[in-house]
Each structure stands twice: as structure tokens, then as C-alpha cells.
Image (cartoon, coloured by chain):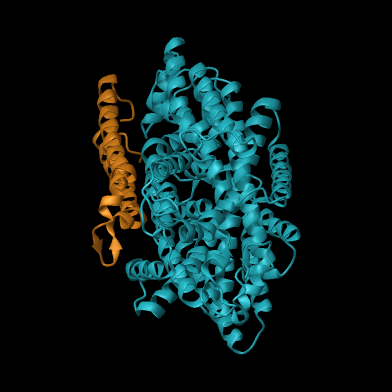
Chain colours: A cyan, B orange
Amino acid sequence: MANQTSSSSFVANLGKIYGVYTGGFIFFVLVLAVLEQMGVPNKILGYCFVFLTIGVYAYIGWISRTAEISEYYVAGRVVPPFFNGMATGADWMSAASFISMAGGLYLGGYGALGYVLGWTGGYVLVGVLLAPYLRKFGQFTVPDFLGVRYEGHTARVCGVVVLFCASFTYIVAQCFGIGIITSRFLDIPFEIAIFVGLLGILVCSMLGGMRAVTWTQVAQYIILIVAYLVPVVWLSTKLYGFPIPELTYGQALNEIAQLEQKLGILKPHVGAYVDAKGQFSWVEFNNFWALTLCLMIGTASLPHILMRYFTTPNVKDARTSVGWSIFFIFLLYFTAPAYAAFAKLEVYTNVIGQPISALPAWVQNWSQVGGLLTIKDANGDGILQLAEFIINQDIIVLSMPEIAGLPYVVSGLVAAGGLAAALSTADGLLLAIANALSHDIYYKMIDPKATTLKRLVVARVLLVGVALVGAAVAGTRPSGIIQMVAWAFSLAAAGLFAPLVLGIWWKRTTAAGAVAGMIVGFGICLFYLVGTRYFDMQLWFGIRNISSAVFGIPLAFVVTWAVSLMTAAPSKEMQDFVDSIRTPKGELAWVKGAVHD
Amino acid sequence: MAQLTPQQRDAYWQKTSRLMWIIMAWWFFFSFGVHFFAVQLNSITILGFPVGFYMAAQGSLISYVVLCFWNASAQNKIDEEFGVAED
């Protein structure tokens, strides 16, 4: 893969290569399963899963190393739609999807389905409104588009600021997830575990940039989807004798409803828009749609996702690729509610009501990981009551195989999957930040004459720097994974969606309008987020701060629209440029004031 | 024929925009419209699933996959009709 000819034969043989890889992975899991039966200790199995999978990613990262600018930034634009779909799936599904989402569903029931909807529906927006046009534009980064369309460095810098804030918040959440997994399965302290995981991130992305990240992400997708499906399919078969959990968990929902009555739980799992007492609540209703909206629009604004569509060979492939992306993401997302239902059923039937002294070993093991599981015999009767069992949403998925009494090899597999999800997203995010800083700030603004070598060195140094800071912040445990990720979506949505969409769909959008819209939209969102989180500010209309973009998004559109109409229309050249982005075929029109290359 | 006349270009963009609005309408329906009635839909149960819950957990997701592929193929047809599809 080091030179052009072997690179094209690599692309032609992708199906075969990843087919063999998948077979190899399954074989590896089976071998470990046999070893477990032969009495190999759990700790060793955990080490095997963590180190062997990271080793594979490192190997792919190493053979994909590159010294070419377009390979480094956009994987040479040769990624077929199907495989770009898989890579986007891994890029997309992070620790939040893999580790926390089913946990959120477990705790929140219907209310948490806002995450499921919000993290899938956004792809319709990506495919219809943005991806094909950004692909036609054909530069390296999202701020690049803003800089050219809105003629100058102001819009570019605003874009980089939003990108940085959103992606950095997101990276911290991933480092946190990586910390949880490595700490539990390697049996080392959380703060050290984060930095061990960090090495895993860096080996993939540092040498090969987007090219290495793309091909590791495909590999990571395969591992994470297998890891997610195996325990759920297993449980579905065990409980109902049928291996398609998406069809059988309706029965689990029924049994849960009966157990809820028996245990005296007021808030039903499937109840829509209910408060803690099980009554309909408008606050819950509003929060549900607000969260869905923010996550969807955030999807269509996050640069690490949008830049994946820069890597397809052409515009048509970018569109198809969005279809494959949502398909591969869908496979995990429509399984998550089943995961949650089975976990709840297992806990209600096999854990609650047991003597505390007789609880299995996993309770002890998980209690040691940073207070994520607590069991307290409040009434001193020696029997575990529902209120005495407090489990954090971030460990439901990871601990479920043990809760359900599956072999430890399944736990190891799930850990490897969670690690793949967190690493792949962290890689995509790191690359988005480092590329924006090295390409948009350093190359386009500070030193436009920099040599290729120097540009790549700067990109790599920044990558390592951002990764270290992200891990250090994660070590302070700022918040739960899913909350941090939702904030990232809100920040991106409020700052970037309006200028991107209007820049393509409304020719009249002016530079001043876009910049004003970005500043106001992002500003309000940040104000609400920081105010309610750190300064006890009153909630507006009861909307929680994970949906803080719900105020910023419409405001960004209104301000962009109003200021655009107050300023002079964009030049004829700019209007021709927009036309040339809108049609798949043909050259891009030249725009004055655009960056020269 | 890559170069379109202004009239052709407007017609092309009109068709593209129309497709965009249609897909957006379906997107809105499946993202918000259905779920506004989740409480009522939940009183119906199919295969053990309350329908309101089912729509948010699976139904809408299936519609998103369909919408994305539908958009890709419909837009390709428009591109070919106007001769702006890539070679």
C-alpha cells in the first residue's frame, strides 16, 4: 500500500481482504472460547482481546502510512461507497452508542429513544442537504468550505472554533470510555488506563492520516458490530429460542411490564413522555423532540462525519455512501433497545431479590471501577432491593454478559467492541481537529508556502498534542459519556448547520450573514450550556442542557437570513461557484478571494 | 454535455429541490410527526411491542435507511435526465 499501484490493487481486493480478516477474527474468538473452557484465567482472556485487537489496528495504521497530502487528508479519494459506509459507521458509533446508549435505554426507557432517533435520522439530512455538494466542492476540510464560500478568513476561523469546541468535547468523552474499558479489563487504575488507550488511538492515525484511519475504521466496524450482536442474539436464543432479538424483545417488554407491577415501579419502561411518577409530562415531551432535533442536526454538522464523504471517488458515490452508512449504523441502533430490554429482564429476575452475600463475582469486579456500580443494603435485611442496586448507564452493556451468566469470552468480545467503537471515533475526531488546525489555520493562514513535509509534520505534532490534552481532561471525569457527547452535538449543530446548508441552498447568503449567524447561534448555545451546567442558571422552558442547540439553531438561521438581506448580494462569481457545486459534473467555477490552490 | 443553459440549470435545480422537500417531509413525519402520538399509539400492541415504542425503536430507523437510498437513486435519475451525471 506504500505506492500507487499496490494501492489500487488493494482497493480492488477490499472484499477479499476484509472477508479473510472477519474469518480470522471469528476464529480468534473461538480459540479463546476453547481456552476459557480449558481453564485459562479471565484476566488473560481480557488481555488477549485488548492487546490483539489494538495490535491489528496498529498494523493497519503502520502499513497505511503515507507522505502524500491527499492520501493523508482524504485517503486519496478512492474509498468505495460500501466501505466508506462501514468506516463512517465506526467513525460515528462511539463509546456513547456502544457503551452508554443501551444503558441509557435501560435506565430511561422510552425517554432515551430520543438518542436512538437522533443519532440515525441525521443521515437523511447529511445525504440530502450536504454530503454530495461538499464532495463536489472537493477540498480537504469543512472550514475550507466556509472559507471559500464566505470569502475569507473570518468564516474559516469561526468554523475552526466551532469544530474545535464540539470535537474536543466529544474526544474527552471517548477517552473516558476507553479509560473505563482498559481499566476494567487490564486491571489498572482509570487515570493510567486512559493513557494506555491513547497509544491505541495514536498508532492508527498518526502516520497514515485519513488513509490509515479509513482502513482501520472498516476493521473496527466489523469487530464492533459482531461484538454488539453476539450477546443479544445469544440471550434472545436463550430466553425465547429464536436468534433475532429485534423480533423477540417484544415478549421481554411484556415480562418487564409485569415485573414492574410486582416490584411497584411507577414509571413504565415503554411509557412515552412520563415523569418519575408515571404521569404524562409536557416537559418530558418537549425534551424528547428537542433532543431528537439537536442530535439529528448535530449529525449533519459534525466535521469528522462530513469529511468522510470527501473520500469517495465522486458525487454519486458520496450519496450512495450515505445510504450504506445509515444501514450499517442502523444494524446497531435497532438492536440497542433489545439489549436494554434483555438486560433489564435479567436484572429484575436474577439480581433483585437475591441475598447480597450470594451475588456473583461480577458485582465485586465492577464495583471497583470508579464507583460505577454500588450495592448498599439500606434496610439491612441481606436481600438486594431494587433501590439498593445502583448501576451507572456506562457499564450496562459491558457488564450484561456477566449479569446474564454468559461465558467470559463474550465479555471480552464486548470489551473489544467497545474499545473499537471508542478508538475509531476518537481517531476520526482527532484527525478532524488536527486537520483543521494544520490545514486551515497553519497552511491557509499562517504559512501558505509551507512544504508538504512541513505540513505533515505540523499535522502530526498537533494530533499528538490534542490527544494528550483530551486524555488529561478525561482523567478529571468531567461528566457521563452520553451527556458530553450530546453537548458536542449541540455545539456543532448551533454553529455549523446554518452556514453549511444555506451556503449551498440559498445563493443570497452573504459572508457577513453567515458569520453573524454562526456567532449568535453558537454563542447562545454555549451560553445556555455553560450557564445551566456550571452557574445554576434556570432552564428555559424546562429544556435540559443536552439539547441546548434547540435555541441556537433557529436563531442562527434567522440571523443569517436577516443579515444577508441587509448586506450586498454575493458577487456573480460566487453565484456561479454555488451553481457549479450544485451540479455533479463539470469543473468548479473559480471564485475570487478564494484560497489559491 | 457538462455546460447547461441557465434555463436547464434552473429546471435541474427545481427538480432537485422538489426531491429535497419531499424527502424532508417524510423525514419530518418519521422523526417528529409519528412520535407526537406515541402515547396514543402505545395502546395498540403488535407482537408484544406497543406501537408507539416500536416506531421510535425500529420503525423510524427503517424509514431512514429507505429514505437515504431512495434519495440517492432518485437524484441519480435526475442527474442522468439532465446529462450532469459523472462519467
The answer to which of A212 and A432 lies nearer the viewer is: A432
Residue at 68 percent across and 51 percent down: it is A477
> Would you say residue A276 is visible in this rendering?
yes
Is A412 situated above or below A529? Answer: below
Q: What residue sits 41% from the left and 24% below the top?
A: A578
**Horizontal and vertical percent position of residue A358:** 60, 82
Between A70 and A403, the one lying in front of the other is A403
Q: Quadrant of the N terminus of chain A?
A: bottom right
Q: Is residue A202 above or below residue A460?
A: below
Q: Is residue A295 found left or right of B58 in the rendered image?
A: right
> In this view, which residue lies farthest toward the bottom?
A38
Residue at figure coordinates x 38%, y 49% from the top left: A273
Identify the residue at horizontal 37%, vertical 30% (top origin): A582
Question: Considering the image in quadrants, where does the C terminus of chain A appear?
Answer: top right
Query: Horizontal placement of A184 versus A526: left or right?
Result: right
* Position of A235 relative to A125 (above/below): below
Residue A591 or B68: which is nearer the viewer? B68
Residue A123 is situated, as x and y percent measured from the top left of the image, at 40, 45
